[in-house]
Amino acid sequence: MTSGPTMDILEAKYADNDESTKLFKIFQELSRPSAIQIDDVIVKSCLNLQTNRIYYGNFPEDDRNTFIASMLESSGFLIKDQTRRSTSQTGKSAGEVDIFIQDSNHLPISLIEAFNLTYVDKGYIIKHIDKIFTYDANGLQNNYVIVYSNALNFNSFYITYRDFVKSHTFKYPLLRVEEDPLIIYSELKRFTFIHNRNGVEINMHHIVMNLSLPF
């Protein structure tokens, strides 16, 4: 995951433009949040949701998604919650993704698909994961799956979920899987699938959090 272009790279990129155009384009690029900044806000939003006990147990995923969307919006991103994007899973009409993140120029940044699970419901999981690839018309570098786990044994659930997703045959070839060494929490875990989409590496980040009610 990159932190964004440097001034030297941007200077070279727009060297053929006149000075005012070059400065404007450089300013636009520097104003766009980096992948690391976006990722940091998404993870913090999940952690903040997890500290709020009202969202535990049998709580509607739409309300959990609205909390995440509100946190992202308060961080300065343009958010469309359950927006209509691209073609649906059947290819017949536009469909919904849970959260669509844009920058200040309304350019797409990331898609988030988030859902409740009490067990590893294979058909339901694949439906949501495949939906992101279907709705992502642009081939965004970083998209997210957020799982709100209500399973009784979170660690067992996480391992089973991760191993099942690894076994799925994706629309775009899977190059490798990376566990996140910076996520050191016992109740929130994360791994990333790196895919080859038409010669470009794209990331599908899976964030799995424990929201089951404690005994």
Image: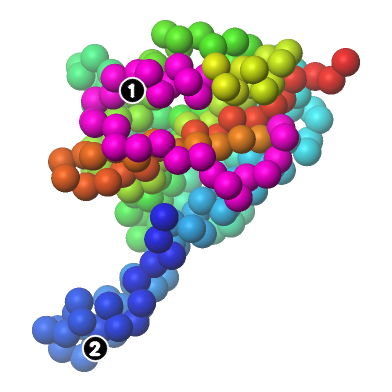
> In percent of the image, x 48 and y 58: which residue is there?
36
Q: Which residues are magenta?
A: 161-187
Of badges 2 and 1, nearer the viewer stands: 1
The mark tally for this picture is 2
Question: Which amino acid type is marked by label 1?
Answer: Asp
Q: Secondary structure at mark 1?
A: helix
Q: Is residue 190 above or below residue 5?
A: above
Q: CA distance from mark 2 to mark 1?
A: 43 Å
Residue 197: horizontal and vertical position, in percent?
21, 39
Residue 61 in view of the camera:
no
Picture quarter with the C terminus: top right
Q: Secondary structure at mark 2?
A: helix
Residue 32: horizontal and vertical position, in percent?
40, 65
> In percent of the image, x 34 and y 71: which residue is there?
5
Asked if residue 164 lies in the magenta stretch, the reply is: yes
Q: Is residue 12 above or below residue 188?
A: below
Coloured how?
rainbow
Give the camera-side residue of 126 and 23. 126
Q: Which mark is residue 130?
A: 1
Q: Is residue 119 above or below residue 31?
A: above
- Asked where in the image residue 120 lies, by quadrant, the reply is top right
Residue position marked by numbered label 2 in the rendering: 20
Q: Residues within 10 Å of mark 2 (few under 14, many from 20)?
A: few
Q: Residues within 10 Å of mark 1 (few under 14, many from 20)?
A: few
Residue 138: horizontal and vertical position, in percent?
24, 43
Question: Which amino acid type is marked by label 2?
Answer: Ser
Give the camera-side residue of 191 and 88. 191
- Asked where in the image residue 106 lies, by quadrant, the reply is bottom left
Give the camera-side residue of 140 and 194. 194
Q: Which mark is residue 99?
A: none
